[in-house]
Image (cartoon, coloured by chain):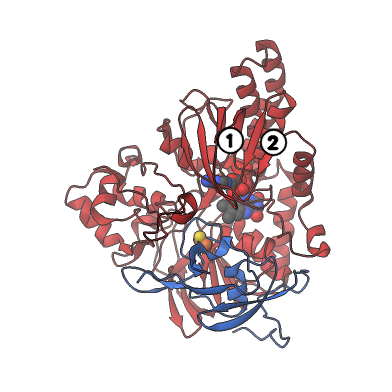
Chain colours: A blue, B red
Amino acid sequence: MSESQSSSPQSFHRATDVERGGLVRIVFDGRTIEAYAGESVAAALLAAGIRTLRASPRADAPRGAFCWMGICQECVIVADGVRRPACRLEVRDGMVITPGTVP
Amino acid sequence: MTDETDLIVVGGGPAGVEAALAASERGLSVRLVDEAPQAGGQVYRAPPRAFGAKSQQKADRLGVALRDRLCASTVQTHFDHIVWSVSPGYRIDALGPNGAVSWRARAVIAATGAQERVVPFPGWTLPGVTGLAGATIMLKSQGMLPGGLTLVAGQGPLLLAVAMGILKAGGKLAAVVDLASQAEWLADWPAIASRPDLAWRGLSWQMALRRAGVPMLYRHAIREAEAKGDQLLVTLGPVDAGGAPIAGPEREFLVDAVTVGNGLTAATDITRLLRAGHRFEALRGGWVPERDEDFRTTLSGLYVAGDGAGIAGAAAAAIDGRLAALAVAHDLGRLSDETYQRLTMPLRRKARKAKRFGTAMAKLMALRPAQVAAIAAGTIVCRCEDVTRGEICAAVREGARGVNQVKAWTRCGMGPCQGRICGDIIGQLVTGTGNARVEAGYFTGRTPFRPLPLDELAPPIAYGDLQLPPPAPL
Ligand SMILES: Cc1cc2nc3c(=O)[nH]c(=O)nc-3n(C[C@H](O)[C@H](O)[C@H](O)COP(=O)(O)OP(=O)(O)OC[C@H]3O[C@@H](n4cnc5c(N)ncnc54)[C@H](O)[C@@H]3O)c2cc1C
Ligand code: FES
């Protein structure tokens, strides 16, 4: 259990001794999420409790960030119309993101 | 548009930066290209630029020094540029923030580092299960915890580093699960102690984890993970020295996240694409480019350095980079034989010392074949295409020879990661037992090295935005 360090409005995922960039808002699958400049989309979504970023093509199983270094492509999402690995893409205010599931 | 320099270094980790600096000190014109926003590589990854001064100050001092020296040099740097192809001659194609670019160079040093290897278990594809090396990025660069309560499993030095990172960032640990026994760590102690700084850090971390009451399970591995709502139910069990599960009490942990890793494999995209010679070295992370003592590959003008030349760690990578750069300067006729010998001798000595420590770490990180042999038939091995162990083994039984044929028959390794995550495991599965890894071979190199948004390469074209690699030859 996450014996909630999440009493602060911030996510318990975010280490507290880190000085982040300015507040930005992004939208994932219709939900507005607050994040900080400099964070990757994958990290910002993780902090908001979102770990499933797409479904796999054959088994249609949930997938999320795995390697965090731009290799595995498990974290691919569609950001402002372009497919990108979420772990290598920095959040930008107003960014609109949808899951990277290939229809 | 192309624009020629003496040397292009691909990769701005310790190997690539030292290579670029050493070459420019010898008067060569040098470009350094990296897909990351700043130099440092995996080990000295810089905090994002938008993070505040306090975060910047916490960056590893060695990394800051590396970036400062690079800044003060004549090296032309191109960050945020993904190199997606290298062709003979040499021509480098990259995609950066302003679109496609290409450059020419008389020599290339591939210093592309390593990627993580994870031995598959049922549930390793669930969201919330991430790589151990990947967790270092989360922690160090993003200041982000993988979960509230995290289980850290696998093998090698990153286990303790990640566990400590989680504790320091205020996270909680369910357990640290090590494939190795404590005796294995001790057996390599003399070599580990050749780096007293790191040996001491390792010891103090172990003590800190014990003090924090974290269960440390040696000779154990994850049997399976199952989704329970937002959490993961992880079953652990004992293993033997080869990594095979053995009878004994199993333990269950309900956790928020799992980070797991079984060592690193060399990133050999460039040398495989150009068909340089490779050899199999289990202690260097599997298939590595053939290279001489100064990191010349079998192709004239192509050099390798750092973990991409075989896993040996950050200290060795920096020295390798310098040796490779001196070889380039010599081979381009910019360094006399005598000067070359004089400069390389002391470096080679240092390289041997660094390698001693690197080899001790590599032993702890090496793949344990019996662990791979025990993967259940229904377990997904290739994440991209959802190909199971059973399907891979069926292809082998039906006569597929070598990893490239298995790939053509089953699609394993054909997805967007191009087999970087599963390649070493598939090689091991195709081989079965014995020393036949050489016959099983390695996945043929393909371009682009990463899936690229096609519209950025050729703006008028609009069919889909993923450029997938072409199928492998049979
Ligand atoms: C995810 C990860 C985390 C790690 N964390 C640690 C750690 O915390 N501590 C530790 O001691 N060791 C760590 N390691 C081990 C690490 O590999 C070495 O210690 C060290 O970083 C090796 O240095 P290098 O210069 O050979 O490669 P790296 O430092 O990996 O540098 C390679 C560089 O090449 C770039 N690159 C690769 N391919 C391309 C391309 N196609 N186009 C453009 N750029 C490219 C990468 O962005 C990277 O910056 C980690 C390894 C991995 C894979
Ligand atoms: S997590 Fe692997 S590419 Fe992003």
Return the x and y of residue B463 as percentages of the image width and height: 36, 59
Asked if the residues shown at circle 2 and circle 1 are in contact, with their CB atoms under 8 angstroms apart, the answer is: yes
Relative to the observer, which residue lies in front, B58 or A54?
A54
Name the chain letter of the residue that bears numbered label 2.
B
Residue B63's place in the image compared with B258, above or below, is: above
The amino acid marked with disc number 2 is: Glu
In terms of secondary structure, where does tag 1 sit?
Answer: loop
Mark 2 surroundings: few (<14), some (14-19) or many (≥20) residues within 10 A: many
Q: As drawn, which residue projects farthest toward the bottom?
A: A7
Count of numbered labels shown in the rendering:
2
In terms of secondary structure, where does tag 2 sit?
Answer: helix
- The circle drawn on residue B18 is 2
Residue B102's place in the image compared with B374, above or below, is: above
Residue B225 in view here: yes
Relative to the observer, which residue lies in front, B300 or B203?
B300
Quadrant for residue B137, please give it: bottom right
Return the x and y of residue B21 as percentages of the image width and height: 72, 33
Q: Is mark 2 within 8 Å of ligand 1?
A: no
The residue under the point 31% across, 68% down is A58
User: Can you say which quadrant of the picture contains the N terminus of chain A?
Assistant: bottom right
- The circle drawn on residue B305 is 1
